[in-house]
Image: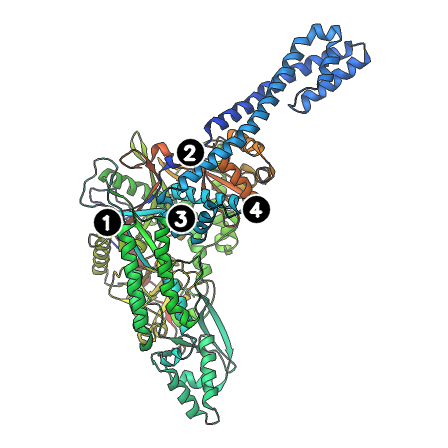
């Protein structure tokens, strides 16, 4: 929703003026070298040699079988002829040792002994050696598992890892302590080993910030990089904040219990609407999710709706008294019970709630306290003070605290919160932390001008390529599904549109790319979508066995080249030319990778300054555009919605005071994108932005619909990796690394047949690793890959030469089903850019934001003013 360079056109060449805003670097907290101890290079080399020897055994066996075929008719003795036939079958049937009875009996025949005796002895000896080697591998595999288990234990016993573990999962940390005391069963110990291995793979193989497992750094815009991505060591830092979901849960309990509900101010649900003479409809939050409900009409509800507007803030006693005055036969206890029913149903909303916009967790808690009954505020403030003191201790001593001491501090914080929320009947699980931790990575970095220009060039090329047009097609299909009720030439009142219910999640999930797109495509989009998929198949079919393929680039119309605002996640690798880019997800939100962690960057936050400056510049050039914040009520994971305020205007459709539900209208523009106006007849175009990575689908329909206005400025489908094609799943089972010019847009990946997962799940001992290495050799897997398995298909780094990793993978496939996908780690570790002073290499991801092209905003403004649609009158809300 920004434009740093208002004069820039969509088809301009890269200039010396930097197009990108300040970048964010996300870095895994453990280097790739951490895996050395759990890899099994010698054993897997031995297994690979053993597998390779099978080819020589088969070759010599085939030659011997051919000689037997020739000589069998010449053997006169029946027993020898039978032995020859049995030996021939044995040679074809397996690689097992040849039974002595066959060779001994056959070699007694002079003709056989003279003709092929040496060959028989050689094949028999080779097979015997092969079997002996297999037996030795079995023994060594057991020894290697013990060694790797000890190495894993050594890695996870490190104080820094233990600190990360005790914060990530208190229950696993307790299991670890119990295991050290020898008080858990063998089965529990094996499960714990699997869990610890997954945490290690997460610590090394994922740069997504989460506790102490990974951190973020903001680009130093004052330093000129002399290499493409200049990374240097810097002090790390952490920030500890309240876990807002727990406090929100406490408010939910307080809002349903006396005596506190008598002290609160209440308001009527602003979505409550009379459908007809028989029913009312309203939306509300249920267990953190948005739901639309209907209720039969009765006169007390009609009185409530008429007597108290959503802007009023009466006490519960005021509502009860008004009911008794209007309905003389209603006794006070009945009125009180009716109010409680309205509270439980979501017709009455408490004003004690999570704020709809906040920069960090502490600010949110302070705002919550101000909404509490006066009798509770002092207790909450005391709790807040205790949490702040604990947070200060953790922040100041995180590098020296023992894990047990750190866990004790977090447990102390938990007890402080239990002392408050327990008053209202809110429970806190022993595995829940009431504080969360974010980490500033121990690096500082800057991007060279050449790299910034290279990134811009590749992103613009990727936008024009648009996955052979499927990015735009998927966006239009999602808009049609999401805003399907919008008439093209009619401005629909926002309140009316929001009251329709409907799907609030534009993301589509399916087995294959084709299913994801075509399952929701209308006839208007089905034909071009099928044509695009055919284009992909024509491109890939001839090269499906290649390791790398450079895609043919289709010319795109100039109108498709103007870029909306957005950000992208990139992976950078070293190359002889300087840097190689892998383009990950593109999102229409510049703040997507920044806002959640803005509180880590302090006063020298170049990103926030850039964002505010560019928003102001865009608003000045296009007065028709009004950039706004969105009120978000995400009850599921509220910490994710933290973001600094960028603009002066806040849109909150559930705040009856601003009248947005009654006055605002929504209509499609000439591209079919939704356009929001503040009122009927208004020329001002509202651009509401969530400015965060918060997932709103199903959680807050109002925020979700408003966020989609800015979300659909771009092509949301480009945020996810290129999905699997149907033929990739059913017949190809492999997709090469895909290059667009010299940028990677999809890593090499494999979709093995289910038989591989079943084999790994059912195999035991060294056979599991042998079968895995057979696939590794056949598919040409690199040493490090990501696997996706289990119900959630969560990615996990796997060393393909690790006996313990394959053992645990097989166990997981046995528990959760044989489905397995594999993807290369790209860039490879030798090309990692982020390195510490000791030369250790870290997985890093670079998030880069940009402003919209001038041509984009100009088209948006011009398109919204074309063919002025008919106005519709909003019904009473």
Q: Position of residue 192 (x, y in %)?
A: 49, 46
- Mark 4 and mark 1: Cα distance apart in space: 55 Å
Which of the marked residues, 2 or 4, is nearer the chain's N terminus? 2
The residue at 63%/15% (across/down) is 125
**Alpha carbons under labels 3 and 1: distance apart:** 48 Å
The mark found on residue 8 in the picture is 1
**Badge 2 element:** helix
Q: Position of residue 321 (x, y in %)?
A: 40, 89
Q: Name above or below for residue 549 compared with residue 274.
A: above
Q: Which residue is mark 3?
A: 165
Tell me residue 689's x, y (percent): 32, 60
Is residue 464 shown to the viewer in this render? no
Secondary element at tag 3? helix
Around disc 2, counting alpha carbons within 10 Å, would you say few (fewer than 14), some (14 to 19), or many (20 or more)? some
Q: Which residue is mark 2?
A: 37
Q: Is 741 situated above or below 60?
A: below
Mark 4 lies on residue: 815
Q: Are marks 4 and 1 in contact (CB under 8 Å)?
A: no
| Above or below for 145 versus 299 | above
First of labels 1, 2 by sequence position: 1
Whether tag 2 and tag 3 are in contact, CB under 8 A, the answer is no
Q: 818 or 395: which is nearer to us?
A: 395
In the picture, measured across the screen, residue 773 lies left or right of residue 861, that is right
Question: Dots 1 and 2: beta carbons under 8 Å?
Answer: no
- Of marks 3 and 1, the one in the foreground: 3
Dot 4: within a 10 Å radius of its alpha carbon, few (fewer than 14), some, or many (20 or more) residues? Answer: few
Distance, label 2 to label 3, CA atoms, is 19 Å
Give how far apart the Cα atoms at labels 2 and 4 are: 26 Å
Local crowd size for mark 3, using a 10 Å CA cut-off: few (<14), some (14–19), many (≥20)? many
Mark closer to the observer (2, 4): 2
**Pointer 1 local density, CA inside 10 Å: few below 14, some 14–19, many at least 20:** many
Q: Is residue 781 left or right of residue 874?
A: right
């Amino acid at each position: 929703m920004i434009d740093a360079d208002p004069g820039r056109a969509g088809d301009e060449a890269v200039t010396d003026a930097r197009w990108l805003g300040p970048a964010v670097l996300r870095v895994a907290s453990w280097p790739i070298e951490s895996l050395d101890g759990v890899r099994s290079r010698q054993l897997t080399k031995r297994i690979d040699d053993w597998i390779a020897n099978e080819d020589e055994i088969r070759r010599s066996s085939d030659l011997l079988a051919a000689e037997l075929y020739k000589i069998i008719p010449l053997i006169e003795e029946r027993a020898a002829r039978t032995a020859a036939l049995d030996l021939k079958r044995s040679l074809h049937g397996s690689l097992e040792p040849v039974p002595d009875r066959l060779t001994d009996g056959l070699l007694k025949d002079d003709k056989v002994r003279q003709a092929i005796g040496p060959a028989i002895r050689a094949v028999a000896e080779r097979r015997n050696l092969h079997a002996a080697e297999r037996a030795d591998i079995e023994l060594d595999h057991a020894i290697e598992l013990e060694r790797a288990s000890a190495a894993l234990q050594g890695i996870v016993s490190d104080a820094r890892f233990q600190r990360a573990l005790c914060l990530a999962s208190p229950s696993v940390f307790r299991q670890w302590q119990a295991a050290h005391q020898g008080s858990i069963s063998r089965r529990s110990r094996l499960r714990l080993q699997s869990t610890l291995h997954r945490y290690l793979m997460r610590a090394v193989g994922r740069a997504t910030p989460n506790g102490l497992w990974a951190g973020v750094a903001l680009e130093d815009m004052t330093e000129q990089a002399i290499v493409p991505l200049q990374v240097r060591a810097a002090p790390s830092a952490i920030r500890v904040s309240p876990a807002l979901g727990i406090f929100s849960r406490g408010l939910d309990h307080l809002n349903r219990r006396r005596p506190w509900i008598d002290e609160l101010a209440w308001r009527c649900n602003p979505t409550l609407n009379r459908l007809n003479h028989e029913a009312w409809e309203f939306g509300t939050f249920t267990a953190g999710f948005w739901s639309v409900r209907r209720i039969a009409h009765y006169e007390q509800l009609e009185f409530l709706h008429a007597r108290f507007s959503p802007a009023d803030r009466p006490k519960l006693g005021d509502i009860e008294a008004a009911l008794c005055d209007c309905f003389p036969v209603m006794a006070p206890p009945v009125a009180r019970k009716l109010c409680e029913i309205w509270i439980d149903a979501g017709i009455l909303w408490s004003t004690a709630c999570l704020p709809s916009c906040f920069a960090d967790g502490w600010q949110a808690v302070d705002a919550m306290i101000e909404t509490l009954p006066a009798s509770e505020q002092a207790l909450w403030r005391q709790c807040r003070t205790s949490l702040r003191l604990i947070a200060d201790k953790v922040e100041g001593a995180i590098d020296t605290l023992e894990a047990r001491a750190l866990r004790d501090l977090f447990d102390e914080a938990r007890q402080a919160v239990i002392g408050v929320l327990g008053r209202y009947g809110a429970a806190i699980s022993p595995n829940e932390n009431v504080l969360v931790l974010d980490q500033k990575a121990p690096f500082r970095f800057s991007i060279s001008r050449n790299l910034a220009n290279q990134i811009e060039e590749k992103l613009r090329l990727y936008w024009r390529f648009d996955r052979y047009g499927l990015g735009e097609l998927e966006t239009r299909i999602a808009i049609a599904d999401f805003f399907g009720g919008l008439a093209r030439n009619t401005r629909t009142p926002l309140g009316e549109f929001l009251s329709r219910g409907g799907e609030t999640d534009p993301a589509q999930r399916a087995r294959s790319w084709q299913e994801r797109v075509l399952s929701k495509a209308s006839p208007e989009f089905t034909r071009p979508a099928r044509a695009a998929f055919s284009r992909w198949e024509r491109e890939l079919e001839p090269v499906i066995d290649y390791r790398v393929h450079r895609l043919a680039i289709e010319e795109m119309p100039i109108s498709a080249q103007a870029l909306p605002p957005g950000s992208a996640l990139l992976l950078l690798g070293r190359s002889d030319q300087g840097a190689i880019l892998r383009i990950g997800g593109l999102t229409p939100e510049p703040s997507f990778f920044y806002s959640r962690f803005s509180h880590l960057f302090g006063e020298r936050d170049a990103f926030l300054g850039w964002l505010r400056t560019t928003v102001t510049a865009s608003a000045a050039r296009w007065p028709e555009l009004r950039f706004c914040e969105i009120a978000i009520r995400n009850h599921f994971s509220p910490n994710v919605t933290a973001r600094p305020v960028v603009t002066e205007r806040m849109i909150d459709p559930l705040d009856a005071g601003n009248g947005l539900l009654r006055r605002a209208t929504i209509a499609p523009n000439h591209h079919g994108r939704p356009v929001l106006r503040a009122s009927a007849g208004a020329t001002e175009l509202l651009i509401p932005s969530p400015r965060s990575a918060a997932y709103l689908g199903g959680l807050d329909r109002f925020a979700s619909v408003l966020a989609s206005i800015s979300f659909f400025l771009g092509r949301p489908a480009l945020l996810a990796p290129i999905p699997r094609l149907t033929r990739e799943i059913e017949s190809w089972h492999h997709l090469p690394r895909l290059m667009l010019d010299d940028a990677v847009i999809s890593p090499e990946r494999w979709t093995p047949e289910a038989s591989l997962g079943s084999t790994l799940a059912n195999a035991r001992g060294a056979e599991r690793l042998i079968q895995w290495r057979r696939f590794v050799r056949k598919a040409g897997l690199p040493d490090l890959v990501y696997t996706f398995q289990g119900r959630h298909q969560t990615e996990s780094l796997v060393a393909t030469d690790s006996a313990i990793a394959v053992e645990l993978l097989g166990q997981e496939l046995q528990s959760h089903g044989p489905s397995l996908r594999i993807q290369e780690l790209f860039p490879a570790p030798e090309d990692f850019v982020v390195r510490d002073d000791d030369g250790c290499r870290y997985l890093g991801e670079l998030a880069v934001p940009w402003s919209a092209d001038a041509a984009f905003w100009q088209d948006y403004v011009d398109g919204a003013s074309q063919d002025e649609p008919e106005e519709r009158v909003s019904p009473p809300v």
